[in-house]
Image (spheres, rainbow, N blue to C red):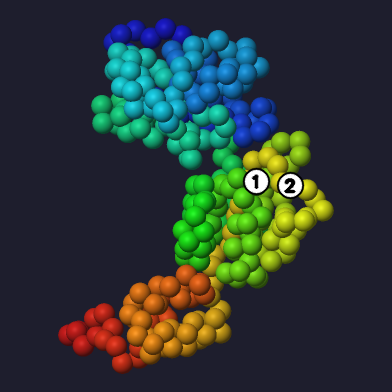
Amino acid sequence: MTHSRAAAGRLAVCPTPIGNLQDVTLRVLATVASADVVACEDTRRTGVLLARHGLTTPLVSLHEHNERARARELVARMRDGALVALLSDSGTPLVADPGFALVRACLQAGVPVEALPGPSAVITALVVSGLPAERWCFGGFLPRKQAALRALLGAASETLIAFESPRRVPATLQVLAELDPERPAAVCRELTKLHEEVRRGSAAELAAHYGAGSAHGPLRGEVVLVLGAAIAPPARTAEGAQALVELIDAGARPRRAAAVVSKLTGAPANELYRRATPGARQPGAGARR
């Protein structure tokens, strides 16, 4: 479709299938068909999707290494009336995928941005996990460093959804089991594909299933982890508070020690500090009402 120079250009953010090519929506196909250009993460992969549906819209690459430069070029085209369709390799663009810089550039230039609904590995995993969906958080790709990983897992106050490399899943589940062996979780692998697998259980059960020496062999494919909220049992909080008291008696700084014990136990640092230092002045104590 050709646009006149007087027409208003825009960016259309188009989700693509996360595994099954039949999951692309009719609206996305219609938008791509009428677009002047498709900006995509991998032109070869997107080309396969377009060819399947008989689409010949020109493709340009947009990835983490060229996004800022490409954004300037595409914004100029949209200001001149072009319709640009933004696609990622799979799922919804911007969600752990390129596209943020382009969307920001469009908004700053006054170019309309339209988001089309469609496939998302995050939402699909949440729905099939069996874990609470009222409040949840997407953590992107999990940290590789164990200290950062422990801090993230221990601080999650709601259902946590994250991407993880299949070869790191066993170690991640082991860390989760060390923090709370009973914490509910789901390992979602190859969603919407032929060999889709969703395994649910406690952190300890899943760590044992996927651990080293597992009879099931190494994990393969794309993995989404869905983890229940971190809940510190009263007993764990009490034990942590007692440990904090001993650290303070040994000369440790209360606040810093509370943060360390919190990471190890999953108990809230403020609660540990309150229990270990009952005589300490609390924020707002003594204030006029």
Q: Residue furthest front?
A: 250
Q: Residue at x 71, y 50 (%)?
A: 198
Question: Of residues 218 and 280, which is closer to you in this image?
Answer: 218
Q: Please identify the quarter of the rendering in which residue 11 is found.
A: top left
In this rendering, is residue 84 above or below 209?
Answer: above
Q: Which quadrant would the C terminus be assigned to in this image?
A: bottom left
Q: Position of residue 239 (x, y in %)?
A: 52, 85
In this rendering, is residue 46 above or below 58?
Answer: below
In this rendering, is residue 76 above or below 187?
Answer: above
Residue denoted by label 2:
218
Q: Name the secondary structure under disc 2.
A: loop
Q: Position of residue 285 (x, y in %)?
A: 24, 85
Q: Name the secondary structure under disc 1.
A: loop
Q: Residue furthest bottom?
A: 279
**Residue type beneath disc 1:** Pro
**Is residue 107 shown left or right of residue 175?**
left
Question: Of residues 273 and 248, which is closer to you in this image?
Answer: 248
Cα gap from disc 1 to disc 2, whole angstroms = 8 Å
Q: Residue at x 68, y 31 (%)?
A: 20
Are the residues at dot 1 and dot 2 in contact (C-beta closer than 8 Å)? yes
Residue denoted by label 1:
166
Q: Residue furthest right?
A: 215
**Is residue 71 shown left or right of residue 220?**
left
